[in-house]
Amino acid sequence: MHPGQGAPANLREGSRHHGCPDESWTTARVRDVIGRHLGIWYHSDHVRKLLHALGFTPQMPDGRAAERNEFRIASWKEQVAPELKKL
């Protein structure tokens, strides 16, 4: 996060932009980004309250791969799965 920029803009840059291994934001990750960029180290519970005050809400990932190919899955279910059941 850069001084003068709002937190929502920095969060929209994505967690990978800030050095995280994936795109999910956790309060601990937000806390670390604030600490590294602004030199202010909040407790994670306080970060959660700040995020809530800014309108952010907890989100659960859907658990599906971004590369998921629905056509190939349907084809597998139609062609391969029945053959496996025969075994």
Image (spheres, grey):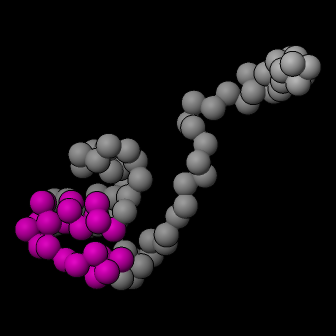
In the rendered image, residue 87, in percent from the top left (x then y), is placed at 87, 18
Asked if 20 appears above or below 84 in the picture, the reply is below
* Left-right relation of 20 to 34: right
Asked if 86 appears above or below 28 in the picture, the reply is above
Mainly helix, strand or loop, the magenta region? helix
* Left-right relation of 73 to 43: right
Q: Which of 84 and 6 is in front in this view?
A: 84
Question: Which portion, as a residue range, is magenta?
Answer: 27-48
Total labels: the figure holds 0
Q: Residue furthest left?
A: 39
Q: Residue at the location (38% across, 44% down)?
A: 22
Is residue 43 rendered magenta in the image? yes
The N terminus - image quarter:
bottom left
* Left-right relation of 22 to 75: left
Q: Which residue lies furthest to the front in this view?
A: 87
Q: Residue at the location (73% across, 22% down)?
A: 72
In the rendered image, residue 23, in percent from the top left (x then y), is placed at 40, 47
In the rendered image, residue 12, in percent from the top left (x then y), is placed at 37, 55
Tell me if I can see residue 40 in this picture: yes
Asked if 20 appears above or below 25 in the picture, the reply is above
In the rendered image, residue 13, in percent from the top left (x then y), is placed at 33, 50
* Left-right relation of 23 to 79: left
- Asked which quadrant contains residue 66, the reply is top right
- Asked which quadrant contains residue 82, the reply is top right
Q: Residue at the location (29% across, 65% down)?
A: 28
Tell me if I can see residue 3 in this picture: no
Q: Nearer the viewer, residue 37 or 42?
A: 42
